[in-house]
Structures are given as C-alpha cells and as structure tokens.
Image (spheres, helix red, strand yellow):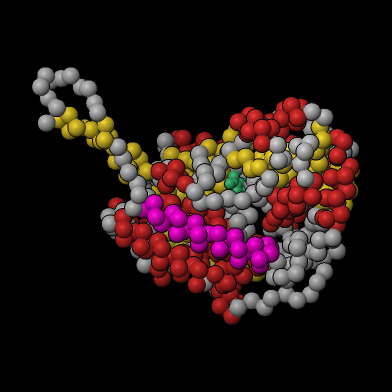
Amino acid sequence: MSTAPLEPLAQVTAFLNRRHTSFIDGRSIDVHAGEVAEVFNPASGAPLAQLVMAGAEQVEQAVAAAQRAFRAGVWSGLRPADRERILLRFAEVVEAHGEELAQLETLNQGKSIHIARAIEVGASVEYMRYMAGWATKLEGQTLDVSIPVPPGTHYNAYTRREPVGVVAGIVPWNFPLMIAIWKIIPALAAGCTIVIKPADETPLTALRLAELAIEAGIPPGVLNVLVGRGASAGAALVADPRVAKVTFTGSTPVGKLIGTAALQNMTRFSLELGGKNPMLVLPDADLGKAVGGALMGGLLNQGQVCAAASRIYVQRSRYNDFVEALAAAVKGMSIGAGMDPTAQINPLVSRRQQSSVLGHLDKARAQGAQVVTGGAAPELPGFFVQPTVLAGVEQSMAAAREEIFGPVLSVLAYDSVDEALTLVNDSQYGLAASLWTNDLSQAMRLIPQIEAGTVWVNTHVPLDPNLPFGGHKQSGVGREFGRGAVEAFTELKSVCIAY
Ligand code: NAD
C-alpha cells in the first residue's frame, strides 16, 4: 500500500465534526430525540460523522415542506427561464465547491479522489447544466380532433406538460452525490419539489448539496434531504400519499417493494435497479483493448457500478490468452485509500458490502470457479477486497448470474457467436452490455438482439446526460437522462376548447 494520503480541506473537517440532521425547509432541523447513527470511513473503518436519523415525524415535516413549496408556486410558478438560470447558478456553486464535495465523498464512500472529482463532481456539474436547459424546452402538441357534436362546433385541442408535484428520490451508496443530482435536477427543471433520501451509509454529500442549493437561490422547501433508514424513513416516504412520483435507484428487491408500495396510491414511479452486465468479446476483437475495457468497465469504483462489466464472454480459442492478460493487468493494481491519489483499487463502501463480496467469492470457489488472481481481503484495516479474476466460470454458476457489486470479473468461454448471444441474454437483468469488435456487420446484427437498455461497442460504462439510461427486464422501469427523464417528472394535460 502506498502512503501519501491527501489531507482533507479545513471545511471538510469542520463539516464532518458537525452533528447532522435532516435538511428540511431550507435548514438543518433541530431534533432532540431519535436514533443517533454513525457513518464510517471505509479506508480505515473508523467513525467519520454522526447523524440523527429521521423518524416518522421528520418524514412528515419533509413532505409537508415540499408540498407547501410546490403549492405556493415558489418554484413551479417561476418563469422557466428563471428556473433555468437558478439551476445554472446551482451548477456553478457546486463546481466552486467541487474539491470539498469530492473529498467528502471519498472519505464517506471510499472511492478514489480522482473518480470523485471527475465523476461525482465533474460529470454531475455537466449533467446539471444539461438538465437546467430543459426547464425552458418542455413542450406539448397541438392536435386536430374530429368531435362531431354539437353540429357546427369547432374545437381546438392541445397538450401541456405540468410538474407532477412532490417527488421522493431514493438514492444508493455507490455514487451518492451524482445519483442524487440525477434525480434532483430534472425534477426541479420540470418545476417539481423533492425530498431526497440518501443511502444510510452515505448521506453527507446530499446534505452539503442541499445547503449549496440555498446558496444558489433555490427557495426553501424545494429541495429537502431526509437522513434515515431505508426500511423506516424510506418506506414511509414512498407510502406518503402526498408524494406524486418516486424515483428510485438501488437493488432489485427493494425496487420491487417500492413499486408495490407506490401502486397503492397510484404514485408514479421509476426504478433504476441492478445489473449483471455482459461484455461480449467477438472473435475478431483486439484483446488488448478488451482487457483495457474490462478494467475500466469492471473495476471502476471497485465494481460498485450498476452497469459494471461483470461477466465477460471470450471465444474458447482465445480464452486462455485473454484470462492471462487480464490477470496480469489486475495483479499489478495498487490497493489503498481513496484519499491516496496513487491507489488504483480502493475500499468498498461498508463492512457489510465487503462481507457480501467475500461471500460471493466463497460461493464461486465452491461451485468450481478458479480464482486466477485476488480472491480475498488484503491485510488492511478498511473494507478492502482484492481485485479478482475468476476463470472457468460456467453460465449456471452464481458468478455468472448474481450481481456481486465488487471488484470481481468472471470470464466465460463460448464457441459460436450465436451461442454467445444466447448466453448474453440468459439473465434476469438487462441494464447494459458491450460488444468488442471491428466487424461492423456483426455488431449491427447483434445490437438489436441484445436485451439491454444500453449497448456499447468497443467501450463499457460511459454515460452522457443526453443518452437515455435504464434497464430492460428486472433492471428497472423507466429511463434517466435525456428529454424522457424530465418528462417523467411531468403529467401530460389535454386541453380541449370548444368555440
Ligand atoms: P438498496 O436497494 O439496499 O438501497 C437503496 C436505497 O433504498 C437506500 O437509500 C436505502 O436506504 C433505501 N431503502 C432500502 N429499503 C427501503 C424501503 N423498504 N423503502 C424505501 N427505501 C428503502 O441498494 P444499495 O445497497 O444502496 O445499492 C446497491 C444496488 O443499487 C445494487 O443492486 C445496484 O445495482 C443498484 N444500483 C442501480 C443503479 C442503476 O442506475 N440502475 C445505480 C446504482 C446502483
């Protein structure tokens, strides 16, 4: 392990030393009772900050604040151009506080400071600017209608998009700041107000973000953050009939609970869930590029990426060469804290996630997979797992079917391309997939046949605010990014005028 960790900025230390509560109606609320919880630094396992977890009373307060702000029109009643301008200012404020937010995320989530700077902050600021622009671009249609009665009556019909109302945004722990922003900005661009429930493990950047929103001029009550447990505060938020739309990112089992609860009130919902994403290395592929793609696509954020490449299909004749090259590249990776800028593999988010990944590795061994490199926790105090390559994986094994959400790459062999296509689609999930080839005809033939919301060719994992993202099958319902993401925070109203 290398030793040169970054010292946190003074404002980061000051923020960590505060006792945090939920952020409701423009301020951190005073609470005198309730569960006090700690969040941890995954690099050391040491406590990082203290929070008072929200109970039913705070859920009630947060939804009431969001509903008041919505009904008063302090946000939805602004000119779209004013909402856009304020959201652009919000992006500027986040950018100006970028290093502070990146350090806070690295300390709380464990990820590399480089990823925190480039993705949690950098890509999110671009996303904020892109989504801000939609505030002024929502549109309806004018429609010709043929209503015959009463005779002689003329009709004019059109549709308009209106904000759906109070949104509940439930966020996981893998990209806490970025995924909160994915929910907040399109909801606000559409004119909604929102209550965000960050993951229990990683609430800090969302709390800081809410403070920065006020600094940017977003009115109190428009963005609220509830720190609380998923099964209590999260569930109460989803079940609140004043919530008009739930946008959830997280695991498939919790997504099903949320969808079921939302249906009871006919609350609109979108779900971005898990994945077991294939990488199909076609017979003509450049193996060096495919190995690079597997490292980027599979080990980014320690594999705690819903779209991570986690099952890699290579033709049998090139299988050993690929496994050898991949293992050689993985073996050389340095392991250390996210605040150590030289470390390439960082801790997982929690002790629980570390145990879960180690449990998947035990199961893989027991089912006959071969650990080519890695396969254990290094002798370090934090929540680390060595980057791991599994060979000899068969389609029936858990390592090819279950989401591991850790730094584990399973490599499988295929004989024909058509067999490989069957294996790629043989999954309950359908979030993303990648093809590795320079054979254009083969790629164009396969793309429509792959059951996934995103197909990359010769790359794996890049996202863009203008490119819809979401899953087929059990990977979810709905799409984030692009026009559709903003429209998903609106209701379509039909207007018909007789004259
Ligand atoms: P999780 O489902 O356990 O938790 C996600 C969020 O839901 C947390 O905020 C949690 O507190 C909350 N929650 C838990 N139970 C709840 C309930 N009953 N009602 C309301 N809220 C509840 O998932 P996680 O462990 O935080 O994240 C990892 C999972 O998320 C992985 O499966 C991963 O694939 C998925 N994920 C998907 C995407 C995507 O875009 N598709 C992105 C990131 C992560």
In the rendered image of this protein, does residue 107 appear above or below residue 200? Answer: below
Image quarter of the C terminus: top left
The residue nearer to you, when weighing 61 against 103, is: 103
Count of numbered circles on the image: 0
Could you tell me if residue 76 is visible in this image? yes
* Residue in view at x 81 percent, y 41 percent: 411
**Residue 299: percent from the left, percent from the top?**
73, 53
The image quadrant of residue 257 is top right
**Residue 201: percent from the left, percent from the top?**
63, 58
**Residue 480: percent from the left, percent from the top?**
51, 45
The residue nearer to you, when weighing 367 against 462, is: 462
Is 26 on the left-hand or right-hand side of 298? left
* Residue in view at x 50 percent, y 68 percent: 95
Is 340 on the left-hand or right-hand side of 444? right
* Residue in view at x 76 percent, y 47 percent: 290
The dominant secondary structure in magenta is: helix
**Span shown in magenta:** 110-135
* Residue in view at x 56 percent, y 47 percent: 249
Q: Is residue 130 magenta?
A: yes
In the rendered image of this protein, does residue 74 appear above or below residue 418? Answer: below
Could you tell me if residue 235 is visible in this image? no
